[in-house]
Image (cartoon, rainbow, N blue to C red):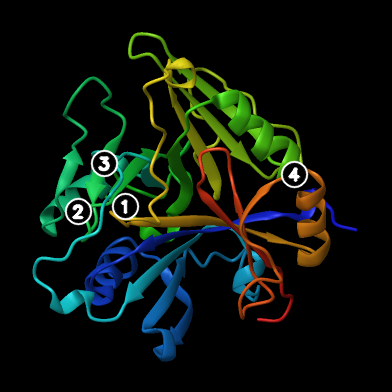
Amino acid sequence: MTDPKTYILNHTMLRVKDPEASLKFYRDLMGMTLVNRLDQPEANFSLYFLAYDTEEHKGKHWTARPGILELTHNYGTEKDETFKYHNGNSEPRGFGHVCLSVDNIEACCNRLEAAGVKFQKKLSDGRQKDIAFALDPDNYWVELISQKLKFPPGTLKEDETDTKNYRFNHTMIRVKDPKASLQFYQEVLGMKIVRTSVHESAKFTLYFLAYLKEDAPKEEGGVNPISDRESILELTHNWGTESDPDFKGYHNGNSEPKGFGHICISVDNVEAACKSFEEKNVKWQKKLTDGRMKTVAFVLDPDNYWVEVIGQHSQH
């Protein structure tokens, strides 16, 4: 048996050209901790797992906690001056961004700008003055949003920010048909909707899903009720794609041009979870029985994004 209530949205994988540059950004500037590293020299790649190593997660095995960013480095890309990964926000589109929630967004943006970080959108740009998009070394978009309260309350001045308070809030992917995607993530993978945001003037809707042990938070006074959380999946639906015969679908990042790789859920019993998914007629990129790695599977969602499935380990 397997219990979706124990499932965790464990990580998001991005391919990076130069791991040292990426670590400088995510670890040194944004305050994440390297919680695991896997080197695979026989396959010519290394994996770097970063997260905000809060008290809540200390001592947990990396597979048994949310809020992880996996950076995949294929050896040699850092030496190729012309090589670059695709960030998903120009054609072919698909993946959109990762999002960090911060304690003091103005101070955070000022700090990043002073460090030479480029921005896709500054706070002062456009209509939305409460969000920004920084660019990481591979030009992936990193959304910055404010937490509900300055955390911890009352300990920061207007010009201060502390990366110890930051959280890896969500990952955004674009979806063609929200009904199909919501059915998959809720009925197959066991997530719940925690927030829906409709933008009529721009003709798009955002659906935020997560694994919850309690009821979804309620929105109060226009404040984002999920900004302090980790491991949320944002599905962006641009109206009309589901009924447009000329729309060819979104790009999952695993064929050229590559960039985004997958999201990953960790489960209590990987064999039982995969059996449950099989009974629900999912499409597979890799079953547990395929290939050499018998402990990892990849399910395909309705847009052919890869969803890795791994088991949770209790020992750190």
The residue to which callout 3 is attached is 133
Which x, y percent locates residue 28?
29, 70
Label 3 or label 4, whichever lies nearer to me, is 4
Picture layout, residue 28 above or below residue 217: below
Q: Would you place residue 300 above or below residue 137 in this image?
A: above
The reply to whether residue 102 is in sight is: no
Residue located farthest toward the bottom when viewing the structure as drawn:
42
Q: Locate residue 2 relative to residue 133 in the image: left or right.
A: right
N-terminal of the pair, mark 2 or mark 3, is: 2
Mark 4 and mark 2: Cα distance apart in space: 48 Å
Residue at the spot of label 4: 281
- Disc 3 is placed on an element classified as strand
Marks 3 and 4 in Cβ contact (< 8 Å): no
Report crowding for label 1: few under 14, some 14 to 19, many 20 or more residues within 10 A (C-alpha): many
- Label 2 packing within 10 angstroms: few (<14), some (14-19), many (20+): some
Q: Residue at x 73, y 42 (%)?
A: 188
Q: Are marks 2 and 1 in contact (CB under 8 Å)?
A: yes
Which residue position holds label 2? 111
Q: CA distance from mark 3 to mark 4?
A: 38 Å
Whole-angstrom CA distance, mark 3 to mark 1, is 17 Å
Picture residue at 42% right of the left edge, 19% below the top: 245
How far across and how far down the image is residue 44, in percent?
A: 36, 84
Q: CA distance from mark 2 to mark 1?
A: 8 Å
Amino acid type, residue under disc 4 in the picture:
Asn
User: Which residue shows up at 62% across the image and 29% down it?
Assistant: 180
Q: Nearer the viewer, residue 95 or 7?
A: 95
Amino acid type indicated by mark 1: Thr
Assign a secondary structure to mark 1: loop
Nearer to me, 97 or 66: 97
